[in-house]
Structures are given as C-alpha cells and as structure tokens.
Image (spheres, helix red, strand yellow):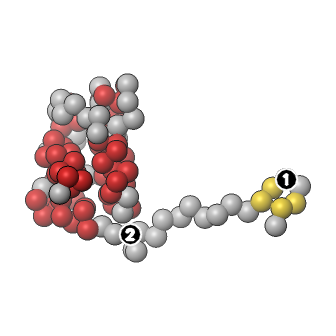
Amino acid sequence: MEEFGFKISKSTRIDLDSACQSLYNQIASKVPDIRTCINCGSCSASCTAATFRRTSFRGAILHINRGFDKKAVEFLKSCMLCGKCFLVCPRGIDTRNIILEIIRSEEG
C-alpha cells in the first residue's frame, strides 16, 4: 500500500532465538573469552585498521551472534592483528585468538 509517497518497509528485526550460532559456540569452546564480551566498543575505537578500512571486532562478534558468519569474516579481513583491541579491552579478552578462529572458520 503506497499513499502519499510512503510505503510500509519490510521488518529488519532479527530473531536471535532462531539465529544459527554454531560458529559462535564453536569459537566459545576454543576461546571461552568470547562469552565475556560486553560489546562496549573499546576495541573498535582503538583500531588502527578501522581508520582506513571497514573492520571491527565488535561488529564481527555481533554478526556471529546474529548468525551472519560471512559478514563477520568480511569485517575482520583487514585486521592487522596489532593487538590494540586486546590492550584496551576492559575484560581482557584475547581478541587475537578469537579473530584467528573466525578467519580460520572460513578456510575450513
């Protein structure tokens, strides 16, 4: 129905109960730190690569939680593994191991 130039948009709601979290659970079994992430954004704010490319550890974790594994890998392809995200993380999450596990998941 379109009146006055407006139309009803399709819902963009994500049903987290039905999202496939197999990759998230697989990574959590190897690196349990992923479960302690509070998505504060400190990692993304300190990221040097994000200045030049679209990369975000926080975004990748959110995508994995929502079942968008391929998008998560795309977010991390330009990561330089410099470790700044690990240094600023208030929870001390081993971000490098998590990033490597996410990237390895695409290969195998």
Amino acid under disc 1: Gly
Residue at the spot of label 2 = 19
Name the one closer to the observer, 10 or 15. 10
Q: Residue at x 56, y 61 (%)?
A: 12
Horizontal side of residue 59 vs 10, given as left or right: left
CA separation in Å, label 2 and label 1: 34 Å
Task: Mark yes or no: residue 40 visible.
Answer: no
Q: Mark 2 or mark 1: which comes first in sequence? A: 1
Label 1 Cα crowd, 10 Å radius (few <14 / some 14-19 / many 20+): few
Residue 52 place in picture, x, y as percent: 37, 25
Depicted 101 relative to depicted 17: above or below = above
**Residue 45, quarter of picture:** top left
Residue 91 place in picture, x, y as percent: 19, 46
Q: Residue at x 37, y 30 (%)?
A: 53
Horizontal side of residue 87 vs 75, given as left or right: left
- Secondary structure under the numbered disc 1 in the rendered image: loop
Residue sitting farthest toward the bottom: 18
Task: Mark yes or no: residue 94 visible.
Answer: yes
- Secondary structure under the numbered disc 2 in the rendered image: loop
Quadrant where the image shows the C terminus: bottom left
Residue 88 place in picture, x, y as percent: 22, 34
Residue at the spot of label 1 = 5
Label 2 Cα crowd, 10 Å radius (few <14 / some 14-19 / many 20+): few
Number of numbered discs visible in the structure rendering: 2
